[in-house]
Amino acid sequence: MSTSTPPNELHELSVSALAQALRERKLSALETTEYFLARMRQHQDLAAFLAVDEDASRAQARHADARLAGGSTAPLEGVPLAHKDIFVTRDFPTTAGSRMLAGYRSPFDATVVHKLAEAGAVTLGKLNCDEFAMGSANENSAVPPVGFDAPRPVQNPWDRARVPGGSSGGSAAAVAARLVPGATGTDTGGSIRQPAGFCGITGIKPTYGRASRYGMVAFASSLDQAGPLARTAEDCALLLSAMCGPDPDRDSTALDRPAEDFGRQLGAALDGLRIGLPREFFADGLAPGVRAAIDGTLKEYEKLGARLVPISLPRTELAIPVYYIIAPAEASSNLSRFDGVKFGHRAKDYADLMDMYKKTRAEGFGDEVKRRIMIGTYVLSHGYYDAYYLQAQKIRRMIADDFQQAFQECDLIAGPVAPSVAWKIGEHGNDPLADYLADIFTLPGSLAGLPGMSVPAGFGEHGMPVGLQLIGNYFQEARLLNAAHRLQQATDFHLRSPAGF
Amino acid sequence: MALTPQEIGRIAHLARLELGSGESEHMRAQLNGFFDIVEQIRAVDTAGITPLTHPVAAVAPVALRLREDVASEPDDRTANQQNAPAVERGLFLVPRVIE
């Protein structure tokens, strides 16, 4: 593919095709970086990027070219990527989409950023996201995107009036619009899978603990997990293999599991694979167009030799309140560090130290963040801890046990990523509950810490993309990617591009 | 259960958040709406269930490791303080708390 691709169509190349062309010296890292920087400038009205530094990107590309000249075979040598602005980076500012961190420069790179750089990747910039990754539509960003003076929502490249999903909305929009071949994201309650689904691309959240959380601005520590977004499962496997691995000196929750080649069984046959369909994922609230797309994809799996098995995840609905207690509880604790003392925003006028804390936090945090801090503070407070937080953690175990029960009868679980396609910007009318309820299908897997993917499954209402969610048992990422790759060999949904991009 | 304005004030104080009166009332309405959907968890029988903290502990014991107690960080004070709102001679400055 790379031999015949003129340099004016580099955005059509996958991560693996670009890496190969770079290794074979058919392209230089610098010309590749220049190409994508120009494309990013051309489409900056999508509001996908929060920070760029073209000279920093060029410097990284020149280093990659020097390594390529020295015969480097690093898997991503010279490939341009962009990072969700939740990962701290030395070469670019990091805001987590918050006024609180406007202009913040990290003295170090997040482990995931560092590992991707070691694999040869060049950073093109930082991608828009909901403030502190709290949101399902990327409408909660408080930082002006590149080219704008004021914050604005990221646009979905398939319909600019619609949201890209969230919280990794900038990552998903940038990949769907082919501004970058791949991007990092983070998933706490669905923040990789749902935007990947809404933008018609592929994304994977690995088992909790696979990737180090060091340098990821913390939201909910027992849920946050990094993962890649790209167009194909093959690319996700390549990126995920570079991102994961133990981080013994930096993250005590990262597992002591060596890095794996997650692409090692991409082409394996699916004969006899048992795909479990939770009946709770196919209930009344599911949009007919989404259901039809998912059903069509499941038929493809049957043609590939898989067997569909009815299962039940009886506590699916309970996952919403359980998640929205645990995640805010952890957030209220994590975000206590933003007090105007060591970094970030500090209020200008205040009476004393207490007043400085309160005004700093009132000015620095957006509405959704404040709501979650309030919920979290309440459920952790004296007299309510047992009734809410501890009770939620107990039900969390029951939800995880339900999955283990289900995996006795199936190898993978499949269903929709979300009950509908991407909604219109502003359609939920600042009603946080509407956003929370739409997270129903991604929350159970998040609470259980299981690996999950979104794979393009066609189009539903308004011609918008539909994502098929695949959930595997712990450490079954290679199998998930295998199932996704085989589907992508049989379908072309992942190859479709939005008009104008 | 419905949160009162006094409770909203108490929680906001614990959270070190200043809320204006209009903001406070709006927050109260939204939190009460939220806790309506949370009530269902109270009815779940969780007797004998151990809370799950690290999700992978659902299938195997997870020991959060401690690293060796040796300094592995270089002295990076200048870089670490470059984002501080107020610094003097390597110290973070805050409003006077001791007269």
Image: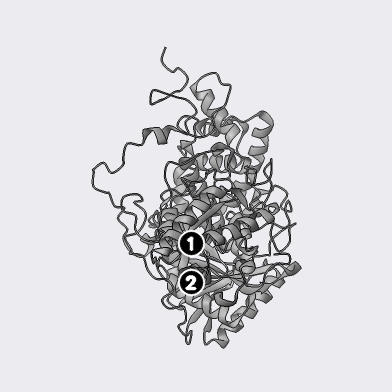
Specify the quadrant that holds the C terminus of chain A: bottom right
Q: Earlier in the sequence, mark 2 or mark 1?
A: 2
Q: Single out the residue that lies furthest toward the top.
A: B99
Chain ID, mark 1: A
Circles 2 and 1 in contact, beta carbons < 8 Å? no
Residue picked out by circle 1? A78
**In the image, what residue occupies the spot 55% across and 66% down?**
A230
- Residue A187 visible in the current orientation: no
Type of the residue with mark 2: Gln
Q: Nearer the viewer, residue B72 or A448?
A: B72
Q: Position of residue A383 (x, y in %)?
A: 46, 39
Q: Position of residue A44 (x, y in %)?
A: 67, 52
Q: Identify the element where label 1 is drawn.
A: loop
Q: Residues within 10 Å of mark 2 (few under 14, many from 20)?
A: many
Looking at the image, residue A250 sits to the left or right of residue A489; the answer is: left
> Where A77 falls versus B96 (above or below)?
below
Type of the residue with mark 1: Gly
> Where A160 falls versus B3 (above or below)?
below
Q: Position of residue A151 (x, y in %)?
A: 67, 43
**In the image, what residue occupies the spot 55% across and 18% down?**
A351
Q: Position of residue A454 (x, y in %)?
A: 56, 68
Chain ID, mark 2: A
Residue picked out by circle 2? A20
Looking at the image, residue A489 sits to the left or right of residue A411; the answer is: right
Q: Nearer the viewer, residue A172 or B88?
A: B88
Q: Residues within 10 Å of mark 1 (few under 14, many from 20)?
A: many
Label 2 vs label 1: CA separation? 10 Å
